Image (cartoon, grey):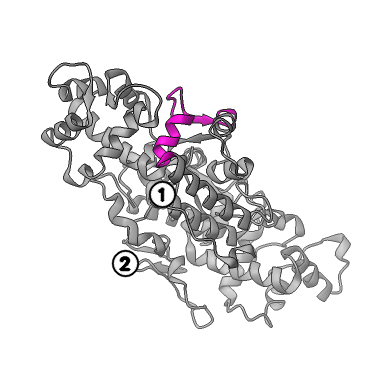
Amino acid sequence: GGGGKWPPGSRGGSLSSTRGSMTPSGSARRTESPETPAEDPKLSRGGTGKFRDLSKKVVDSTKLSSNGREGMSAPAFQKGDGFLGVTEFKVFMEWVVKKHKDLVCLWYKLDQDRSMIITHSEFFRGMKELSYKGNLETLWKLIDRDTTGNISFLEFAPEAALQLTRFKKWATDNFGTATNLFLALDADRSGSVTLKEFTQGCKAKGLPANEQEGMRTLFRLMDNDAAGVRGAGSIDKEEILFLDKWQPPPYLLAEADVGARERLFNALLARHNDNSFMAWRRALDKDSSMRVSYEEFVIQCQALLRSGMREASPPCGIPAMYAAIDQARSGWFTFKDWDSQTHSWLLAWVKYCRTECGSCTKFLQRCIAECNADIKNDIGVDFKTFSKSLNKAEIGLAPSQRLAVFEGLQAPTKRGQSDGGRLTSADLIFLQTWDPDQEERDENLWESLLQNNPIETKEEDKD
């Protein structure tokens, strides 16, 4: 499963190509810049700025890197569900705090088999038994962010999952197994460990200082009693054994390797006409969903390696390279995460088409009509026609930026010539389900989930 958005760290490093270079501050520079609109700091390749203030909350004491979606009808939201989703999330979080204290306690009431996965039926049955009165379908779509049909602990309570991952790593590095950890903490050999024994024992055994503030949460993560499931507020060997069974995604434990990410980026640029959007669609986002999950990324890297691209299998490992892209450790990344500057060019064009023409397809039809061609034939347009139709548009895209968008829009199955071939309405179908505004709303929702606080519903979200 995927997970919530937690704070990305600074990327740093340099990313160079003939189109421009990544400066140490994280903002991309293009050689043809007079017409380029000023870049929004939130669009920096370094991640989403609003999460930086939370970065201290996920500092990794064991050097676990802590290095921020999509849709008009994105998978996790149906069209028009944006405001509904914000409202439902607020209702849910207020209910959690009032009735169950926090997400961890609620999780254990739902995940009674301790599998660390909640199925659709388990979720609906459990929430009804707990008398939740909100819209469960909308809530499910909000939480099942990777749309797998299951909710992982990482998706449900991302900050707690990160704490647990770091604790598991510390325990494994120092004791080997959860059983050995339990024996070390159960000094009086009573067969159980209280919260006091747990906190004192972990400190004595060397749990890093910046993890000690979260020991009460860690204890509740292992103690079914805290959720009112059974027992008397202590953990036994059976309860702690789930640490050995639970396998967090490998990218959570990987130290992000920015250099590996940059080498892959540049290798893909070299193979795809120096165009990151084209590389995105033809090498990574094969299903044109405008996002790539960790599992998809692994598959595509394996395919790239078979094709001769050594950069797709770096010495640091694919998880470490992936972690440098998905700095939020959310389980997938978007085109904005891959190259925020080229994403901003695409976004400018899409917003213009939807505002001035009604849709991207209608913009293309206007281009065809300007050539006095039959729209019904859908012969498509070449780059010259595409660019000419944008001359009066005040979207600030230089010719080279228009070409990058034009080339990338063409279906991944196409292998156009250097001039980019022709763009048809069939090439634009994937944009019908891409809603960049929903990406921003989604990030706001999950920032709130990370902080485990209800959010304020803004009136503007109704739009």
Which residue has dot 2 on it?
24
Find the magenta span and give its range. Answer: 100-122
The quarter in which the C terminus is drawn is bottom right
> 45 or 99, which lies in front?
99
Which label sits on residue 388? Answer: none
Q: Is residue 3 left or right of residue 426?
A: left
With 414 as the anchor, is 57 left or right in this view? left
Left/right placement of residue 398 relative to residue 53 reads: right
Q: Which residue is mark 1?
A: 452
Q: Position of residue 407 (x, y in %)?
A: 62, 62
Amino acid at circle 1? Asn
Q: Camera-side residue: 416 or 131?
A: 131
Residue 21 quadrant:
bottom left
Residue toward you, 328 or 201: 201
Residue 76 colored in magenta in the image? no
Dot 1: element: loop
Looking at the rendered structure, the kind of residue marked 2 is Pro
Tell me if residue 90 can be seen: yes
Choose top left, top right, bottom left or bottom right for residue 141: top right
Residue at 22%, 35% in the rendered image:
170
Above-or-below relation of 134 to 432: above
